[in-house]
Image (spheres, rainbow, N blue to C red):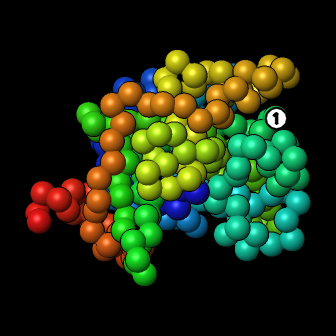
Amino acid sequence: MCGRFTLTHSTEEIEDAFEVGMGGLPPVPPRYNIAPTQPLLAIRPDEGRRREVTWFHWGLIPSWAKDPSMGARMINARAETILEKPSFKTSFARRRCLIVADGFYEWQRVGKTKQPFHFAFNNRTLFAFAGLFDFWERDGNAIASCTIITTAANEEVQEIHDRMPVILQPSEYDTWLNTQNKDMEGAIALLQSRPLANFIHYPVDTAVNSVRNDEARLIEDTRNSA
């Protein structure tokens, strides 16, 4: 699964990496411990198929849900069953997005405890998770929400965890966002587990376990302070 991630780059760096303008959105603050139910930054196509930046609630709330509490169980969507689940299959066909990140956390069980690890590219580059979104509205209350798609862990991640978020390459962004193409095979093919060049992981402090903590020390390699 993917339950926490980071986005620490500046607004200008995000604009350059994804070839998109932030429009009237306020500057993006560095975030070192993004957690479910919190807002996250995403990119979706507008009506003209141009990239548009937006904020989503993390935890997909299907448009047909009775209440928004369902989103707490929908922070991830498994790639293997995405076309089988009523909560995700319509969004896969019509509402795909890029979720902007520069790292994520996974936990490894060590005896009776769990050791957190941070995963990122070794040059700290920005990247995108494959995501789905939906819109929910009842009694004047509207929520735009999303989920992160996960797949089987690649060789780098499986040392720590058996699942990982789907990380897309820049050359794949347009294919993923293009829901006008009714042949979805190209998008489905992007959800396979695969190696990532220059992708690394290292142990970090257990302070990341608390969503109340959100500072730069959370992504520091604890081996350097040993």
Locate the C terminus by quadrant. Answer: bottom left
- Left or right for 44, reference 23: right
Residue kind at label 1, given as amino acid type: Ala
Residue 65: image location, x then y, percent:
85, 65
Look at the image and tell me in which quarter the N terminus lies.
Answer: bottom right
Residue closest to the eye, 49 or 191: 191
Residue at x 44% of width, y 35% of height: 127
* For residue 172, above or below residue 209: above
Give the quadrant of residue 69: bottom right
What residue sits 11% from the left and 63% below the top? Answer: 225
In the rendered image, the vertical position of residue 117 relative to residue 7, given as above or below: below
Is residue 218 placed above or below 164 in the rendered structure? below
Front residue (pair 42, 123): 123
From this viewpoint, is residue 100 visible?
yes
Image: 58 above or below 18: below
- Given the current orientation, which residue lies at the most extreme front position? 111
Q: List the single residue furthest toward the bottom.
A: 112
Q: Nearer the viewer, residue 95 or 222?
A: 222
x then y, percent, for residue 124: 29, 38
> Label 1 crowding class (10 Å Cα cut-off): few <14, some 14-19, many 20+?
some
Q: Residue at x 38, y 27 (%)?
A: 197
Q: Secondary structure at mark 1?
A: helix
Q: Is residue 29 visible?
A: no
Residue under numbered circle 1: 93
Residue 202 falls left or right of residue 1: left
Q: Quadrant of residue 83?
A: top right
Query: Left or right: 224 with respect to 86?
Result: left
The residue sitting at 65% across, 21% down in the picture is 175
Q: Position of residue 137 (x, y in %)?
A: 80, 61
**Count the marks: how many?**
1
Picture coordinates of residue 33 (x, y %)? 39, 62
